[in-house]
Image (cartoon, rainbow, N blue to C red):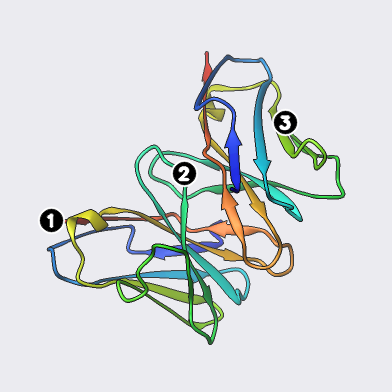
Amino acid sequence: GAVVSQHPSRVICKSGTSVKIECRSLDFQATTMFWYRQFPKQSLMLMATSNEGSKATYEQGVEKDKFLINHASLTLSTLTVTSAHPEDSSFYICSAKDPRRGTQYFGPGTRLLVL
Amino acid sequence: SQKIEQNSEALNIQEGKTATLTCNYTNYSPAYLQWYRQDPGRGPVFLLLIRENEKEKRKERLKVTFDTTLKQSLFHITASQPADSATYLCALDNTGNQFYFGTGTSLTVIP
């Protein structure tokens, strides 16, 4: 069964609004979770590393004020796309690293469409 | 610069044959390497992990090799089936929290 869940799976919003995406680790406690973005027919691009109880580490070129990450517990990380614009439309995927095995397990992804 | 390349964007093979996908990297020293399968509109699904001190790993019809001298991993699917058609991604883990994906190879198994 699913090890990592994401919610919502699909969201359509108006330009200027904020959207929150939740990522939950179901099978293990994840001190580290990751957020990726994927454009059609392209590979996953790491946006940020989310650490439980501390600030997220953002990859170069990713605006931390635009993409707010909160890792409030060992099983939940949230990504908020603030003041979304059409160019933010993409497939957002989270993952959680299983500390016992070193494997990353991915959520099913969230399709965001900003009109 | 750091780079992870996977062979040809698309690979077509006949059902029953062995599919071989490659993952080459430069300027990384990964502690381990992972292979994932991704279907359209879905998140990647973990398949196999191989550590730097392991030469080969198998799981059912899947086999992965890891050559740290050549900086290459090979991913084999034996007795391929149409249901194996998907995009396959390799990912390198430098230990800690650095995890980078290759460009992906789209595999189509023709009945």
Q: Amino acid at mark 3?
A: Arg
Q: Amino acid at mark 2?
A: Ser
For label 3, the residue is: B61
What is the x, y in percent for residue B77?
Answer: 68, 27
Residue at 74% x, 68% y: name it: A100
For label 2, the residue is: A43
- Does A110 sit left or right of B77 as displayed? left
Residue at 58% x, 58% y: name it: A105
For label 1, the residue is: A115
- Identify the chain of the residue marked 3, using the numbered disc in the image: B
Q: Is residue A2 above or below residue A83?
A: above
- Distance from disc 2 to disc 3, alpha carbons, whole Å, reads 25 Å
What is the x, y in percent for residue A25?
Answer: 54, 70
Q: Name the N-terminal-most of marks 2 and 1.
A: 2
Q: Which mark is residue A18?
A: none
Q: Amino acid at mark 1?
A: Leu
Q: Residues within 10 Å of mark 3 (few under 14, many from 20)?
A: few
Q: Residues within 10 Å of mark 2 (few under 14, many from 20)?
A: some
Residue at 13% x, 63% y: name it: A15
